[in-house]
Image (tube, rainbow, N blue to C red):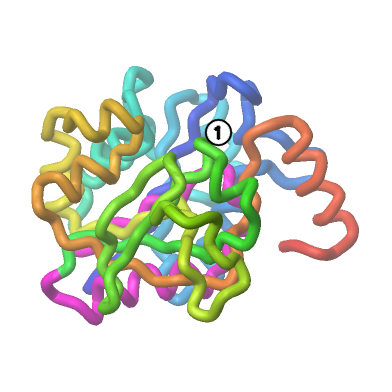
Amino acid sequence: MSVVVVIPARYASTRLPAKPLLRETGKYLIQHVFEQAQRSRYGRDCIVAVDDDRVKTAVESFGGRAVSTRIDHASGTDRIAEVAAGLDADIIVNLQGDEPQFEPDALDLLVQLLLDDPIADMATLMTPIRDVATYRNPNAVKVVADDVGRALCFSRAPIPFGRDGDPDFHADPPPVHLHLGVYAYRRNTLLKLAAMPPHPWEQLEKLEQLRFLACGGVMRIASVPQAHRGVDTAEDYAAFAAAFRAGRTA
């Protein structure tokens, strides 16, 4: 099956304007993400979905492929769906443009979930939660999966809820998991999702993946050892740049 990785890169980030073009490391932030994707087995065909010509020019300057999209998309999913509509590919991966430390092996695992399960329409990843602060943080999306690796529910609330107290964060297997916001879709599934109206659950939680579960879709999920810190703020970028200079990241 053919696989295309699409990286949505939005110029007008609220918390960190012009984020894709940050360049204290000598490379654009979007270039780090692009190169990480291309290190994976399934990431050779990689497209950056842009909403600004400045980002497009930057991507083309390092030899990447950029596709211009509308500026009024409500989400990154809508942006990659616009790109996917013009592609002849079986599987589309949505890798966020602010994940410069995302592991290539994790991307390979994500795609393999769909290759191994012809019934699944979509795949994503999770990682164990090891502290109470993350468990209770509404900005950290929790996921519950069944015993055969299918996602059952996502929430900003602490799920599964410990009725008799907080869960054992060091248990094996871990009882609670953090969702990692990376997805692989079958192309037709992505286009159908983008055309559907938001579901009430989605509107309450502000989680797009609930639209997919609400319509009865099968989403495979696998666990990776740890989350990879994204770049949401100036402090996040400073930490990434420092790690890069110290040789602790690609």
| Residue found at the very far front of the displayed protein | 164
Q: Is residue 1 above or below residue 36?
A: below
Q: Quadrant of residue 129?
A: bottom right
Q: Is residue 137 visible?
A: yes
Q: Is residue 104 magenta-colored?
A: yes
| Residue found at the very far right of the displayed protein | 246
- Considering depth in this image, is 44 or 112 the residue closer to the camera? 112
Q: Is residue 201 above or below residue 190?
A: above
- Considering depth in this image, is 97 or 70 the residue closer to the camera? 97
Residue 168 location in percent, x, y?
57, 67
The number of numbered badges drawn on the structure is: 1
Q: Would you say 237 lies left or right of 151 here?
A: right
- Circle 1 SS class: helix
Q: Is residue 62 visible?
A: no
- Considering depth in this image, is 15 or 49 the residue closer to the camera? 15
Q: Quadrant of residue 245?
A: bottom right
Instruction: Say what amino acid the circle numbered 1 marks.
Output: Thr
Residue under the image location 46 percent in, 68 percent down: 175
The residue beneath circle 1 is: 57
Residue 4 location in percent, x, y?
33, 59
Q: Is residue 191 magenta-colored?
A: no
Residue under the image location 75 percent in, 31 percent down: 234
Tell me the quadrant of the picture where the N terminus can be found. Answer: bottom left
Q: Would you say 90 lies left or right of 64 here?
A: left
Q: Would you say 113 lies left or right of 62 here?
A: left
Residues rendered magenta in the picture: 90-119
Residue under the image location 74 percent in, 39 percent down: 237
Q: Residues within 10 Å of mark 1 (few under 14, many from 20)?
A: some
Tell me the quadrant of the picture where the C terminus can be found. Answer: bottom right
- Considering depth in this image, is 235 or 6 the residue closer to the camera? 235
